[in-house]
Amino acid sequence: MLDRVRRGTDGDDKWAQLTEQGRRILELIAEGQANQEIAQQVNLSDKTVKNYFSNILGKLEVSRRSQAAAYVAERRVRGGQ
């Protein structure tokens, strides 16, 4: 997955697919926060955060929380944030 991000705009296209709220949730996930903590911070239910995260995984084409966090880290290294 990181190879695709390094090659070019694939990662930027994926970032563009995320809503503002989805991006915020993804950033908090990358910081290592649990769903409950995120829910409290963004004033959503735990279930809603889980739904957002499921959609985020699909849009990023990854299946693990750690892969989503790695995507954010790689994007930061590239100066995308």
Image (cartoon, rainbow, N blue to C red):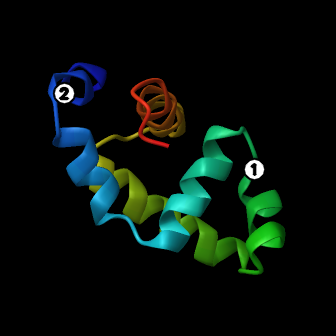
Rendered residue at 31%/48% (across/down): 60
- Report whether 20 appears left or right of 1: right
Indicate whether 70 appears above or below 59. above
Residue 73 spot, x, y in % from top left: 51, 29
Location of mark 1 (residue): 34
- Name the residue type under label 1: Ala
Q: Quadrant of the N terminus?
A: top left
| Crowd class of label 2 (few under 14; some 14 to 19; many from 20; radius 10 Å) | few
Rendered residue at 26%/52% (across/down): 14
Q: Quadrant of residue 59?
A: bottom left
Rendered residue at 34%/53% (across/down): 15
Q: Which mark is residue 10?
A: none
Say how many tags the image has. 2
For the question of whether residue 51 can be seen, the reply is: no
* 18 and 52: which is toward the camera: 18
Q: Earlier in the sequence, mark 1 or mark 2?
A: 2
* 17 and 66: which is toward the camera: 17
Residue 64 spot, x, y in % from top left: 46, 37
Label 2 secondary element: helix
Q: Quadrant of residue 55?
A: bottom left
- Name the residue type under label 2: Arg
Location of mark 2 (residue): 4
- Report whether 74 appears left or right of 7: right
Residue 7 spot, x, y in % from top left: 16, 23
